[in-house]
Structures are given as C-alpha cells and as structure tokens.
Image (tube, rainbow, N blue to C red):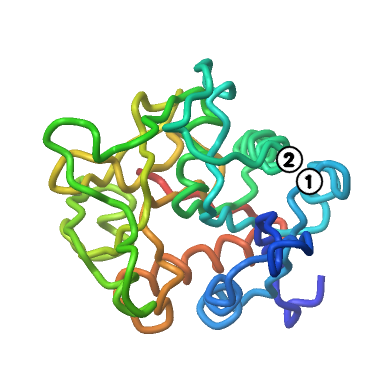
C-alpha cells in the first residue's frame, strides 16, 4: 500500500425518505468531517442494505468502520424480545449488515468506532440486550435529544461520564470524568459477552464500552463525539485513535488497545 494514501473508513449510512418520497442512504456531514479532518481517513458512506453490499465486500474494501447513530433502533428480535411500540422504528436491512459486520471485525481485529445506535449494535452483536426507553427506568434521567433549539443547543454537553480508572478511555482522554452530549432513548440493559463497560452517566446508564481481549480497536460510546470533533477535548483523541487504528490495519499491523 502507498503509505501516503489515506485509510478508508466505511460510514454506515441510514435509510430515509428525502422530501417524504425519495428513498436515500445518507450520513450526517459531521461524521465525514470527523473521519476526514480528525481521523485523517477517507470517508465512504455505505448503503447499509444486503441488497446492495455484502459484509465480505465491506471487509475487503474498508480499513475501518464508523457505526453511526440513527433514528431507527435495532429490532428487539435480534436480542430475543418481542416488538412493542416503545421500541420505536426499525431498519432491518441495517441490522442485517451491521450485526454480522461487527462480529467479523471483532474476530479479524479490524477497527470500528460505534456511536449511539452503533454503541447499541455492538452490545446486541455480542449477545446483549437493550432497554427501549431509558427515561422510564426509575432513577434515570432523560437522555433524549432536546426537541427544540439550534443544532449547537441540541448537541451541547449535558452530563458527566465517569470512566474506569486505568481503563482504555481513561488513558485515551487523560481523565476519569468527561462532559458529553446525550441524544438517545435506548440503552444497554444486559451487557453482551465480553462487553466491558468503562463509562457511566451519573444515573448509571452505560456510556462507553469495548470488547474484552479484542484483537483490534472495538470502542463505542453512547454519546455523539462527531459533533465538534476537531475542537472537543474528548472527541478529538477518540477520532485520532480511531484513525491510527485504521492506518495500522491498512498497513497490515492491527492496533490493539490493551485495557
């Protein structure tokens, strides 16, 4: 590989209807900006539907994957539960791509970074379960995005995340307590196999996880670090480390983060 060539990060796209009629797969510009400007990689938006791409093709095409947030939730049948109105909208095509993709990346040591839904996908892919509505649990706060306001208000830092001392995230951020935004309704109920929870909000909601004894970079956060990634003191080192892992993979030397 030409060492001057940027590694390729596959950004998981979300299905939606443009102008309520035209079907598209898309991703927020802030995801591409974080990948290009902070990770130093080439962003490539993926149509997350097995009708268009296969997991095998993605693994060979991309050096790493950004598992983005999105309005649809992982279907509860993926973790052994019945669908209810509380579980919200779904995207079964994305489920069919991301869940086996995550497991394959864990097995291969190929890097990925999970964000919000991507955080939840990692837990489900490893056998865990989700609670459909965190704010309904006694003692929990409302983690959902504020319904009104400008983007900078909706993505504003809103709560503290406490990190495990000496863990991967502590070493990455240089702190055991960080401020993050919060824009999610669901959250981890039961952690999946080998899922290590290293960050929690003040109300006990899991916020930062990785896979125990993974061969490569398997980090995921429940918040949205892609917002203001170049300037935020938490987002920047996260995306920089992700970029380093993608470059290492592209050069044939998977980067393992030891807890």
Tell me the quarter of the image containing the C terminus.
top left
Disc nearer the start of the sequence (2/1)? 1
Crowding around mark 1 (Cα neighbors within 10 Å: few <14, some 14 to 19, many 20+) is: many
Give the residue displayed 23% in from the left and 49% down from the top.
Answer: 142
Residue, disc 1: 49
* Viewer-closest of 194 and 44: 44
Give x and y (percent) for residue 229: 42, 76
Tell me the quarter of the image containing the N terminus.
bottom right
Along the horizontal axis of the image, is 194 left or right of 103?
Answer: left
Name, please, the residue furthest toward the front. 20
Quadrant in the picture for residue 8: bottom right
Quadrant in the picture for residue 145: bottom left
Q: Are marks 2 and 1 in contact (CB under 8 Å)?
A: yes
Note whether 148 is above or below 76 in the view shown: below
Give the residue displayed 64% in from the left and 56% down from the top.
Answer: 65
Residue 61, which numbered label? none
Residue, disc 2: 93
Along the horizontal axis of the image, is 178 left or right of 245?
Answer: left
* Secondary structure of residue under mark 1: loop
Give the residue displayed 39% in from the left and 77% down from the top.
Answer: 151
Give x and y (percent) for residue 235: 38, 70
Mark 2 and mark 1: Cα distance apart in space: 5 Å
Give x and y (percent) for residue 185: 36, 45
Quadrant in the picture for residue 29: bottom right
Note whether 90 is above or below 53 in the view shown: above
């Amino acid at each position: 590989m030409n060492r001057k060539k940027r590694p390729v990060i596959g950004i998981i796209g979300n299905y939606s209807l443009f102008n309520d009629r035209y079907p598209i797969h898309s991703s927020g510009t802030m995801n591409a900006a974080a990948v290009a400007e902070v990770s130093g990689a080439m962003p490539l938006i993926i149509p997350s539907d097995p009708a268009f791409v296969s997991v095998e093709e993605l693994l060979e095409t991309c050096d790493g994957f950004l598992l983005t947030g999105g309005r649809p939730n992982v279907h509860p049948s993926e973790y052994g539960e019945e669908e209810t109105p509380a579980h919200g909208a779904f995207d079964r095509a994305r489920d069919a791509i991301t869940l086996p993709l995550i497991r394959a990346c864990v097995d291969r040591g190929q890097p990925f970074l999970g964000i919000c839904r991507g955080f939840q996908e990692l837990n489900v892919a490893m056998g865990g379960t989700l609670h459909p509505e965190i704010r309904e649990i006694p003692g929990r706060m409302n983690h959902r995005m504020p319904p009104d306001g400008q983007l900078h208000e909706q993505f504003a830092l809103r709560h503290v995340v406490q990190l495990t001392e000496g863990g991967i995230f502590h070493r990455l951020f240089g702190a055991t307590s960080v401020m993050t935004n919060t824009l999610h309704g669901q959250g981890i109920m039961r952690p999946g196999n080998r899922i290590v929870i290293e960050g929690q909000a003040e109300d006990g909601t899991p916020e930062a996880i990785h896979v125990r004894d993974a061969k490569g970079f398997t980090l995921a956060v429940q918040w949205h670090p892609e917002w203001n990634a170049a300037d935020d003191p938490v987002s920047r080192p996260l995306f920089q480390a992700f970029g380093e892992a993608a470059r290492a993979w592209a050069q044939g030397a998977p980067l393992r983060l030891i807890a």
